[in-house]
Image (tube, rainbow, N blue to C red):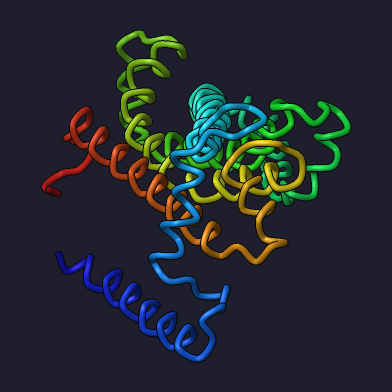
């Protein structure tokens, strides 16, 4: 309840400012009133598009979530596999860690024209931007976490006859999983940024596409609900990851509730 207070104050401040602007100019488009946003969104929610027959808001949401899900899935699998190899095997870490670091420091948005040239304007380039944007960070985070595991655990496992693969699967992997979920949580924000950027430049459907399409008409009554919806989706995903981590790996959260 305490966390809801700042959000309620921001909403109240917005309503006061919007009411003040509309009192001075009833046709103001910068800060639309809730009624205006409801009217604008009702057409996107409940009226099918004349060309495609789709409900635009639902179609935009499903398209963006599909791209985001594929990008996060590929990045998570890559982070787990490559992070385990870099963290457990020093020769692999010495060979490939500089490459991962080099990719991680490149601004992903700068690679967007290259991706569109290489993969075209379809879904592949959009998903690739998400993967390139967040996978190197996740790989470095998982590798550093595994490399920082107590050396005694590795020595005991090797003393008991474990191979490198057994150390990786039985010692490193279980302890890497909670950290992997944390890395996904930290990557949600950048992943949304890269998704919106790709959709804004080359797409015909999606939340980012719709926002940049209506901006030319100053349609803040559509832009603000879309931005709020993106924020709500991100919060729901974050809370789901937290709940999943605490339920599957309660030992990783100690006495936290």
Q: Please report the residue visible at 71 percent of the width from the left and 40 percent of the height from the top.
A: 98
- Residue 161: image quadrant is top left
In the image, taking residue 49 as reference, residue 19 lies left or right, namely left
Residue 143 seen in render: no
Give coordinates of residue 165: x percent, y percent. Answer: 45, 11
In the image, taking residue 144 as reference, residue 238 lies left or right, namely left
The correct choice, above or below, for 178 with respect to 80 in the image is below
Q: Please report the residue visible at 56 percent of the width from the left and 78 percent of the height from the top.
A: 27
Q: Residue furthest bottom?
A: 24
Picture quarter with the N terminus: bottom left
Give coordinates of residue 12: x percent, y percent. Answer: 31, 78
The correct choice, above or below, for 90 with respect to 196 in the image is above
Q: Please report the residue visible at 41 percent of the width from the left and 34 percent of the height from the top.
A: 180
The correct choice, above or below, for 51 with respect to 206 in the image is above
213, 190: nearer the viewer: 213
Residue 178 seen in render: yes
54, 63: nearer the viewer: 54
The correct choice, above or below, for 28 with respect to 244 in the image is below
- Residue 134: image quadrant is top right
Give coordinates of residue 120: x percent, y percent. Answer: 83, 28
Q: Please report the residue visible at 59 percent of the width from the left and 50 percent of the height from the top.
A: 193
Give coordinates of residue 81: x percent, y percent. Answer: 52, 22
148, 245: nearer the viewer: 245
């Amino acid at each position: 309840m305490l966390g809801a207070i700042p959000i309620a104050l921001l909403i109240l401040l917005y309503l006061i400012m919007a009411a003040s602007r509309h009192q001075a100019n009833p046709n103001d488009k910068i800060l639309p009133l809730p009624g205006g946003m409801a009217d604008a969104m009702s057409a996107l929610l409940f009226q099918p598009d004349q060309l495609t027959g789709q409900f635009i808001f639902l179609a935009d949401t499903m398209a963006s979530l599909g791209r985001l899900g594929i990008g996060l899935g590929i990045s998570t699998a890559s982070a787990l596999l490559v992070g385990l190899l870099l963290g457990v095997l020093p020769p692999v870490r010495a060979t490939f860690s500089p490459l991962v670091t080099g990719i991680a420091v490149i601004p992903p948005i700068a690679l967007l024209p290259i991706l569109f040239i290489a993969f075209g304007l379809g879904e592949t380039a959009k998903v690739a931007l998400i993967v390139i944007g967040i996978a190197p960070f996740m790989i470095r985070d998982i590798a550093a976490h595994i490399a920082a595991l107590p050396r005694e655990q590795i020595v005991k496992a090797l003393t008991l006859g474990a191979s490198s693969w057994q150390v990786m699967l039985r010692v490193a992997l279980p302890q890497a999983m909670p950290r992997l979920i944390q890395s996904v949580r930290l990557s949600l924000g950048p992943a949304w940024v890269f998704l919106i950027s790709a959709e804004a430049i080359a797409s015909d459907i999606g939340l980012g596409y719709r926002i940049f399409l209506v901006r030319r008409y100053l349609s803040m009554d559509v832009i603000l609900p879309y931005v709020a919806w993106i924020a709500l989706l991100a919060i729901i995903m974050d809370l789901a990851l937290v709940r999943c981590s605490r339920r599957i790996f309660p030992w990783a959260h100690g006495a936290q509730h």
